Amino acid sequence: MVAKADETHWTQVAPQWIAWARSPQHDVFWAYRDALVEFLGPNAGDALEIGCGEGRVSRELRKLGYRVTATDAVAAMVDAARQSDSADQYAVAGASDLPFDDKQFDLVMAYNVLMDVDDVSAALQEARRVMKPKGLLFISLVHPFRDRGRFAGPEPDAAFILEGTYYGRERFEGEEEHSGLRMHFSGWSQPLQDYMAAMEKTGLAIASLREPVPDKAAENRLRQWTRIPLFIWLKVRIL
């Protein structure tokens, strides 16, 4: 389930996120978009996006040929996705309570949303329920290792410093400011083995894994991520 604190947070910052995500080439999503599209590949199936935000990933899925249903626990996000014609259908729904039939979707997309989920196993169980038997669950996570450290400076070759321990589940809070826009992020950080344990419990298995590098790394803040992964992408199937 999406924790009440997380739902409240994203409801409060929805205007920030909509402005942040819709500013072209503003954040790191745009530097990874080509790699994401290539990894997903074209398809003509039915796709569900869980936690669609303002809809930019749903729009990419439509370009790839999917018939997309976009959902989010925050009504303002769904409204923004609908206003930009991001999908074919929309619903206000949390990750652990999806209003869809069993075995309905060829692809379930969980792009950077499981970090905001209180019960990862429950969210994965719902994703599994609505997937077709030969369907695919795509998961993107901010790499858990990235959450536990920082670069010592802005230089491309700055040392990455691990703070504390990689293990355990921790709450994270932070603000970013770039090109006059500010975004307050909040969620949960936990090691990869915790996600793997939740998948195993749910009867899911990883079919493919990527730790992508930026497509475009002209800025120092992006060149740093050519050395250490910022994201991890998983293609997951039903056992």
Image (cartoon, helix red, strand yellow):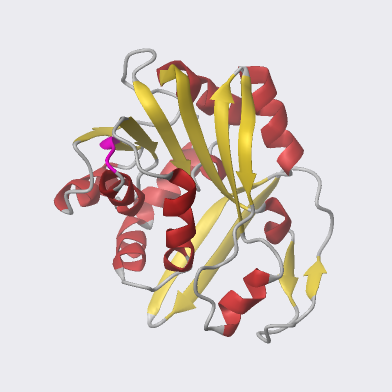
Picture quarter with the C terminus: top right
User: Which of the pair 32/161 is nearer the observer?
Assistant: 32
Asked where in the image residue 19 lies, by quadrant, the reply is bottom left
Q: Is residue 104 above or below residue 69?
A: above
Magenta-colored span: 65-69
Q: Position of residue 161 (x, y in %)?
A: 81, 71
**Residue at x 35% of width, y 44% of height:** 52
Left or right for 215, reference 189: left
Q: How many marks do you count on the picture? A: 0
User: Which of the pair 16/129 is nearer the observer?
Assistant: 129
**Residue at x 47% of width, y 77% of height:** 177
**Residue at x 49% of width, y 58% of height:** 35
Q: Position of residue 18 (x, y in %)?
A: 30, 60
Q: Position of residue 71 (x, y in %)?
A: 32, 36
Q: In this view, does 208 lie above or below 178?
A: above
The single residue placed furthest to the bottom in the displayed view is: 155
Confirm whether the magenta stretch covers residue 52.
no
Asked where in the image residue 103 lies, by quadrant, the reply is top left
Left or right for 115, reference 77: right
The single residue placed furthest to the right in the displayed view is: 165
Q: Where is residue 150 in the image (x, y as percent from the top left)?
A: 72, 70
**Residue at x 44% of width, y 31% of height:** 95
Q: In this view, does 140 lie above or below 102?
A: below
Left or right for 152, reference 218: right
User: Which of the pair 163/128 is nearer the observer?
Assistant: 128
Q: Main secondary structure of the magenta part?
A: strand
